[in-house]
Image: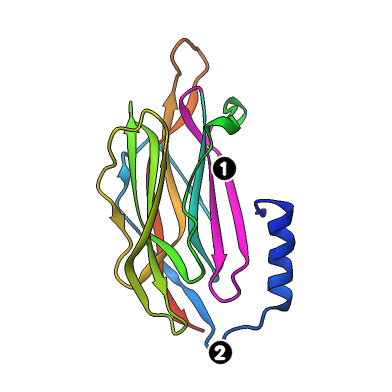
Amino acid sequence: MSFRTPFLAAAAVVLLAGAAAPATLLIFGSSTSTTEVAGGNGTDVVTLGPTGPYQGLVSITWKEDSDIPCWFRVRTRHINLGGTQTHDTNLGGSSCDETSQSERYAGEAPGGYFVNGVSVCRNNQRIKGVHVFYAQVSSSGQVTSGLGDDYAYQENCDQFGAAKYCPTGKVATQIKIYHRSDTPALSNNIKEAATGLALVCRTVEQK
């Protein structure tokens, strides 16, 4: 795991070291459920994000290589202290030469807000846009849905599909990225293209 930038890393270390914990400590429960796939299934799937009980999903970033969405990052936030982490995956291995110009970023939730819904738009089965929806988690652990959203897309994103939501009382801590082998136009270099996303959801509990 890594932080997004040295500045954010330093800020998070200070926060985690010096911030007073809230009176009621919260955790994400150990049992998980996975939403339906937003977009389409691929031939493979990778799970991206933390496995511990404290980090909840706040944003999704992706990049392309020759029109192929093959690099993803999730950003998560500590449910009590607010420190952030990032987790990356390169679906295409060495064949995915993603570019910074293609980077798109969906989500910048304020403290206490976590992703609990997602939809995508696609072109040629490839993910071209990501739309995230938020729930608020109160200091006592109550989850209230329908409180904000954010989205980002590439130029060839036509229309977002139906949103897929975590069950009532749950928010996302990870994503599952469905992908398949794909070959860009005018190329013989086979890459891995993301075709759909699903949220891995967990309940919020008092520690």
Q: Residue at x 48, y 49 (%)?
A: 60
| Amino acid type, callout 2 | Ala
Please name the residue shown 52% across and 84% down the image. Answer: 207
Question: Image height check: is 89 above or below 99?
Answer: below
Label 2 environment density (alpha carbons within 10 Å; few <14, some 14–19, many ≥20):
few
Mark 1 surroundings within 10 Å by alpha-carbon count, few (fewer than 14), some (14 through 19), many (20 or more): some
Residue 160 in view (yes/no): yes
Q: Quadrant of the N terminus?
A: bottom right
Residue 111 in percent (x, y) is at: 51, 69
Can residue 195 be seen at all in this image of the molecule?
Answer: no
Relative image position of residue 127 (x, y in whole percent)? 39, 35
Point out the residue furthest to the left here. Answer: 162
Residue where numbered disc 2 is placed:
23
For the magenta stretch, what is the residue range? Answer: 66-92
How far from the left and from the top, in percent, is residue 52? 56, 67
- Residue at the disc numbered 1: 89
